[in-house]
Image (tube, rainbow, N blue to C red):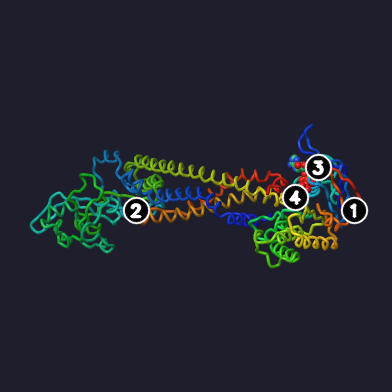
Amino acid sequence: MIQVHNLYKSYGLGKLSLKVLRAIDLVVDKGEYVAIMGPSGSGKSTLMNILGCLDRPTKGKYYLKGLDVSKMKEPELAQIRNRTIGFIFQQFQLISFMSAKKNVELPLIYSDKPAKEIHRRAISSLERVGLANYLNHKPFELSGGQQQRVAIARALVNNPELLLADEPTGSLDTASGQVVLDLFDELHREGKTIIMITHDFEIAKRAERQVYIRDGRILTKEGFVR
Amino acid sequence: MIFWENIRMALDAIFAHKMRSILTILGIVIGVSSVIVIVAIGQGGAAKLSKSFTGRSNSIIIIPSSEMLKKSGGVISPDFFTQEDIQELQHIDDVESVVIKYFETATVFYQKQNAEGIMVVGINSNDTLEEENIEVVRGRSFETSDYGGNCVALMSLEMEKQLFKERNGIEKIIRIKNQPIEVIGIVEKKDDSLMMNTAGVYMPDKAWTKVFGKSNISQLTLRIKKPDAIKRAGNKAIEILNKNHNTQGDYEVQNLEEIEKGIEVVTNTMTIVIGSIAGISLLVGGVGIMNIMLVSVTERTQEIGIRLALGATRSNILIQFLTEAITLSLLGGIVGLLIGTGVSNLINLFTPFPTLVSFPVAVGTLLFSVILGIVFGILPAEKASKLDPIQCLNRN
Ligand SMILES: Nc1ncnc2c1ncn2[C@@H]1O[C@H](COP(=O)(O)OP(=O)(O)OP(=O)(O)O)[C@@H](O)[C@H]1O
Ligand SMILES: [Mg+2]
């Protein structure tokens, strides 16, 4: 699914440049559930953004489904974000003036699906996360856990193979966090590839594999469990 | 992405930010409605305006040319204008109606009283009265049946003063050339310049012919539908008359050049007024849209980041914000059109200015607002489409 080879990311130019990621090598197979851990500022989110095609590496190779992402132009990257990747963020990132259903519809709108299909799939995706009764609620009318489930429904609606979650339970209480993590387990069983950033060892243990990052470098590769 | 989806998204965003949207379109609403009102007054009052410049409302008088008068020693043949001419002139496209006048001076009698050298005018329609700003002050004007041959007359206030000491001329029978004629109304020339309120009698053309035993048309006036068609219609009329009478250069339009100049001044003034108001409204409305769209883009960076993360391309974002700007300014145009039309109708009702909001003007304004939206929406949309998704998402 994912092959990263000798990847660098730095901000700024010349001597003053800040190397956020260094010599990253990472392979994630299809269907794997990987947790990325590391201290604050270690570069986890930066790596995630590159994996999600929201950002480009400064140096190095990134193959997604065998395709060289660094060679792709902006519209192709947009298409990959749209069809192949589902994002889940710590801050939910829902559009505040739009209803749950409209938020979930967005990825389908950007893949030019017919209106009927958009409608049907948005509803079934929200049903899937247990929010069938909240279609017309605005984000501020929902609890944090519910908002995150809307975001998951949105990430799933276009049926992507890869889910990227940056601290998905970071803003949630334990109970709603559990609901989200149970959903992830379910999705993992269904064969989705999941990469999740977390600070919490308990949470990280639910993944098959943990990757530890410090100062922009991957510390352990396979099977690291503390 | 689907066209309608963009419109729907734009409407969602517009209604989600109602106050901001209202502020955004305010400039356009004010601009468009004032343009509509000005144009409505201009179009409705074009005739009135051009009248104030030419002295006549879109009408031209056909006269014998000076060469013809020189040749004939000032004598005009009785068939200088014929009924056939009138028929044919009536069929010119730009001609609304043909107004003819018969003149003769005569002595007017009432019982033992008489007045000499009175101008007796025969007319073929009440248009002539309107044309000359003649209004009935007492009694009634001619009705259609009167033009069928009734021996009736209108007389001027001055005429009444000369014949009736008691000022009670209505329904009295006067005599001209021994023909009894009933006075049905007293008329006065409104907005009159000094000298024109002279003693005079107006009669329907049939009655006039009966009294004087002849039918020499003394003056022929063409009422033209639109001021800008005056020259075309005038030339066409001259051509027809010369052809019918097998002459060359015997007919002439009175003061054609003066009329044209007057109309040109009117049109130019109107163009300048409308142009500058349209220009100001374009600036005010457009800058308003641009300003608030720029603010909107800054405020909505998170939304832009989310959309990019979900698979929107940069051109999707550009089109989204451009559509929003166009929809806003089109909405402003529609509201402005409605308000402008409303105000025009009020002006029509409560002031002496006639107004008219025409279909092409309505369509033109809406088109104009769309262009405005494009021109002033492109910069904010461009800005939105160039944002970095990660920075957008981190701004919380
Ligand atoms: N646009 C940028 N310009 C400059 N430096 C940046 C930029 N984005 C991130 N950084 C820096 O890169 C480093 C890694 O940031 P990143 O967000 O990847 O950390 P993280 O591991 O996700 O931390 P956290 O656990 O707090 O979310 C930080 O030191 C940060 O200051
Ligand atoms: Mg982070």
Q: Is residue B362 visible?
A: yes
> Which residue type carries mark 1?
Val
| Circle 4 residue | A78
Discs 3, 1 touching: Cβ within 8 Å: no
| Circle 2 residue | B351
Chain to which the residue tagged by mark 2 belongs: B
Chain to which the residue tagged by mark 4 belongs: A
- Going by the image, does B385 lie left or right of A21? left
Q: Residues within 10 Å of mark 2 (few under 14, many from 20)?
A: few
Q: Secondary structure at mark 2?
A: loop
| Circle 3 residue | A57
Measured from the top left, where is residue B113 in percent x and y?
9, 55
Both labels 4 and 1 in a single chain: yes
Measured from the top left, where is residue B26 in percent x and y?
50, 50
* Dot placed on the residue nearer the N-terminal end, 3 or 4: 3
Whether the residue under disc 2 has CB within 8 Å of ligand 1: no
Q: Residues within 10 Å of mark 4 (few under 14, many from 20)?
A: many
| Circle 1 residue | A225
> Which residue type carries mark 3?
Pro
Which-is-in-front pick, marks 4 and 2? 4
Where A120 falls versus B373 (above or below)?
Answer: below
Measured in 3D between alpha carbons, the distance from the residue under mark 3 to the one under mark 1, in whole angstroms, is: 28 Å
> Which residue type carries mark 2?
Thr
Location of residue A82 (image quadrant): bottom right
Measured in 3D between alpha carbons, the distance from the residue under mark 2 to the one under mark 1, in whole angstroms, is: 89 Å
Discs 2, 1 touching: Cβ within 8 Å: no
* Dot placed on the residue nearer the N-terminal end, 4 or 1: 4
Measured in 3D between alpha carbons, the distance from the residue under mark 2 to the one under mark 3, in whole angstroms, is: 72 Å
Measured from the top left, where is residue B150 in percent x and y?
22, 63
